[in-house]
Amino acid sequence: MSDNTRPPAESDRDRTPAENAQLALLLEVSGTPKPGNVDRHRDLDGLRFEHFMAGAVGAAAGLRRAEAGDPVGVAFEEAVAGMATQQGGNTQFGCLLLLVPLVRAAATDDLSPAGVSEIVAATTVDDAVQFYRAFEHVDVAVGDPPPDADALDVRRGAAAESTLRERELPLAAIMELAADPAEGVPDGNAREWVTGFDRAFTAADKLLADSGPVGDRTARLFLDLLAAQPDTLVATTHDAATAREVSQRAATVAERIAADGDLTAAEELAGEFVDAGYNPGTTADLAAAALFIALERGLSV
């Protein structure tokens, strides 16, 4: 049988939610340029494009567990552990925090704000314990907790289990605390959990309405998302004022691209952000979530 008459390969058939989640991770890092982030043209110190590719492959088992209906915390911890089996460290922790409940919702045929909110509301204390354990696999940039919340510092990992159980805190409650802390920087990924992934679904609609190569669509979406809201990681690693300035600069470039369609200005901004150490990683997480939703809704690749 010639190559031209071969039967359809497995990759030609419909992808599962777990496979679409992996593809979303790969498409996110392949979108170029994404100012301040690793992409096809830029690596960061000790963190390279290939690490993200390997992280997407490593996360597969955990994503399949989410698809199979296993507890969110178990699936997330396993996905992070698999993601961490490459030499770059934390490549996609935040992406997986968004993707795991979305995969669960897609697997129940209810990938919608209401569907994923139901998944979130059903999380338990056990899920929270697994979430904390995931922090033992990689270093995650997080801000210091308020003085009265040291016992809930995610960097304690498994050591926080007794506190979580004593206070009977399900994972949804942990996300509520992170989304609206008494002090410090609100977490953009946690905010998605408590708002029915509002920004992710809206961003997915933008991807589907756009045209051209998915990598270019992703680059445009990344800039639009960064322009619309300061990035949590930039605010955590620098400060809130810097995060606002980064968003303002992204907005200026996004306006130019909307006017002429030329991504050159974004390429220039990417170089400047990398040199300055501005890494809008939370925005990249949101782009990955939007890509997954768009793929599940028919984005063609």
Image (tube, rainbow, N blue to C red):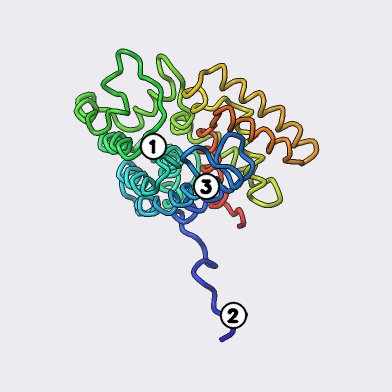
Which is more foreground, mark 3 or mark 1?
3
Q: For the residue marked with disc 1, what is the amino acid?
A: Val
Q: If the image is split into quadrants, where does the N terminus sit?
A: bottom right
Which is more foreground, mark 1 or mark 2?
2
Q: If the image is split into quadrants, where does the C terminus sit?
A: bottom right
Q: For the residue marked with disc 3, what is the amino acid?
A: Phe
In space, the residues marked 2 and 3 are separated at their CA atoms by 32 Å
The residue at the point 66 percent across, 23 percent down is 248
Numbered mark located on residue 3 in the image: 2
Q: For the residue marked with disc 2, what is the amino acid?
A: Asp
Answer with left or right where residue 165 lies relative to residue 27: left
Of 109 and 24, nearer the camera is 24
Of 169 and 49, nearer the camera is 49
Of 290 and 283, nearer the camera is 283
Answer with left or right where residue 1 lies relative to residue 174: right
Q: Are marks 1 and 2 in contact (CB under 8 Å)?
A: no
Mark 3 lies on a secondary structure that is: helix
- Please rate how many residues cluster around mark 3, counting C-alpha atoms within 10 Å: few if below 14, some from 14 to 19, many from 20: many
